[in-house]
Amino acid sequence: MMAYVALGIGLLSLLIAFFFAMYVRRQDEGKGKMVEISGYIRKGAMTFLNREYRYLTVYIIVVSVFLYLLSFIKNGGVSPYTWMAFVVGAIFSALSGNIGMRIATLANVRAAKAVEKDMHSGLKVAFSSGAVMGLTVVGLGLFGVSSMYLLFSHLGPYELSNILFGFGFGASSIALFARVGGGIYTKAADVGADLVGKIEAGIPEDDPRNPAVIADNVGDNVGDVAGMGADLFESYVDSIISAIAIGVLFSAINSALVYLPLLLAAIGIISSFIGVGVVVLMRNKDPSKAMNTGVITSAVIMVLLSLMIMYWNGDYKFESLNKVVPWYNMFIALLGGLIAGIVIGFSTEYYTSDKYKPTKDIAKASTTGAATNLITGMSIGMLSTVIPVLSISVAIIIAYILADLYGIAIAAVGMLSTLGMTLSMDTYGPVADNAAGIAEMANLGKDVRERAEELDAVGNTTAAIGKGFAIGSAALTALALFATYNQTLSGLGHKIIIDLANPSVMVGIFIGALMPFLFSALALLAVGHAAENMVEEVRRQFREIPGIMEGKARPEYEKCIDISTRAAIKKMILPTLLAIIVPIIVGVTPGLGPEAVGGLLAGSIASGFLLAIYMANAGGAWDNAKKFIEKGNFGGKGSDAHKAAVVGDTVGDPLKDTAGPSLNILIKLMSIVSLLLAPLFVLILSL
């Protein structure tokens, strides 16, 4: 019965997202240059996605065939239905990003037009577009997991878990392709546009004379909307799946432990509805206060509703552990995850917003050159890891003491419970960024541009908070998946111990710790190479097209879009395949095996979490330090401090928008692959 309730709430979320989409479509899109520019952006974004999906279709077919063939191996542990769950998870992951991006490319010009009236009108349009993404992701996620449970729960606990892992595998692998491909695209264009346009030519950001400017705006959508949607879809479903899987192992397949994560996700969606409504209806001159109010409202309602649900459920029986956990223990574990998420969010805002000292220190350091800007930004990025690590550590310890490994999984569900609200806020950022760009390129006037820039500045902070939130939740979810890996092996009669005196475990830890660095290096190199090609193309156009700098000739925007598209598609493949192939190689290699895979997961979680937080926050702080100077501080636009800050922002861009946010998917994808193939690793070990 409870699974049907969750299914219904998921469908309701999709219905409300549809109404927000219709609201956005009804808004005035302006005319003339505004519509023309928006059309370029929409066409470029869809061209990239269509080409990317052709490659992903091949990938889905190959992997689903591989999973289907594995199901014929006796005692291999792969269900005959896992390949179908993989396909559905992959399609839902791609669909969540695609829907959000389609609405975002409609909303950007409408938000720019609405800002002509006042700032709140622009905020309402941009945030409503974000709400489409937020409510679509959680709606599809809860609907998908509930459907898998209802369709396959009759098959038994281990087969159900395997099918759910297949669904998560599909979601995670598509998310990583989308995040890496979108990140390479957007930062190749952004870096190329900044290096030639702002530094060499001295023209403003989002100047229509810059050939890379449309590709840059397209990148905001394919990276920070489509990529982010797929990213947080997989975070959301993986947290629910890990809790269900541990619940199945600790109790019966139809127990309260299995229903609880579905119910918590359902009331989280209800809480998000209310938080989104608060932001849309609240008229506040400060957009960040309106969104913070929405986040807090969602969190408070989630706490109250979850308290009622857990009290109503009563105590929870852990049959395999032969103990009963009081309902309030479970509630505190959930609360710990929710509070840790809020703490990470506010910590991220402190380190990346130009309202606070860290970002202002980077801006001040820019007055003495690019080197001091970079040193200060790197230091602040490293310092910003302290609070997230401590908050996650406290949440883990409390959850484990109160409710064992299941408590950790519930803490992850708690952290992501109000994702509908937080993702709405996160997706608002790229829409506001595009709106500011359109206001500049369409010459809508100084007042409109300033209002749009203020919305954009808030969007930079919300995007940074969203990345920190996603990375923090990834650490909890990956740890829950790691615990599920151990429990799954124990159920197969192969209990592993992560013993540092065991050489295979140590090798696994080192390889796992290496993976985020290797992955990030490949992603950053891809951005660097693509940016080099972009720089040469922009220089060529400035040199060879007469009248371009006088605004009398139209730049060849399509060539820059094509450079980013080709680079992203080509370079996204190797980093993503590494996340899938390395756990398999470690698991089947003689002398390594299941224990080494356990070490691999432990090493990747620790190094990936820290590296991701560092890169995301350093990049966000560099970006807002540049914007702080552009407001007139330390000499303003065109000053030496501004030029130094642009260098810092350019270095930080691929950190915060390509490598950093991709790492949270990397560590979960490695965990899901390991979980899915754990029975195969044990089978090979026994041969």
Image (spheres, rainbow, N blue to C red):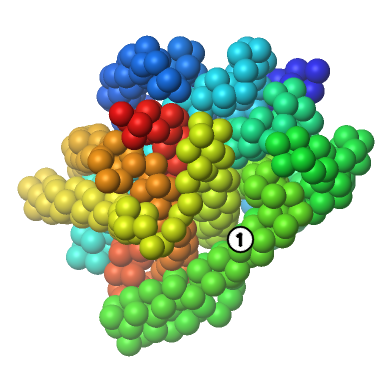
Q: Position of residue 353 (x, y in %)?
A: 55, 68
Q: Position of residue 52 (x, y in %)?
A: 31, 28
> Badge 1 is on which residue?
392
Residue at 37% of width from left, 12% of height from top?
72
Above or below, 667 against 650 in this view is above
Density class for disc 1 (Cα within 10 Å; few <14, some 14-19, many ≥20) is: many
Q: Nearer the viewer, residue 393 or 274?
A: 393
Quadrant where the N terminus lies? top right
Residue 116, given in percent of the width and then of the height, sits at 59, 47
Q: Is residue 640 left or right of residue 105?
A: left
- Residue 520 seen from this side: no
Residue 355 position, x and y percent, is 59, 73
| Residue plotted at (42% across, 37% down) | 674
Residue 491 visible: yes
Is 626 displayed left or right of 344 in the figure?
Answer: left
315 to the left or right of 61: right
Q: Is residue 237 above or below residue 631?
A: above
Residue at the image point whose x is 34% and y is 35% from the top: 685
Which amino acid type corresponds to the residue marked 1 in the rendered image?
A: Ile
Q: SS at mark 1?
A: helix
Q: Is residue 334 above or below residue 149?
A: below
**From the viewer's perspective, is residue 581 above or below residue 504?**
above
The front one of 353 and 657 is 657
- Which residue is located at x 45 percent, y 63 percent? 610
Using the rendered view, name the quadrant where residue 199 is placed. bottom left
Q: Which residue is most to the left?
A: 544
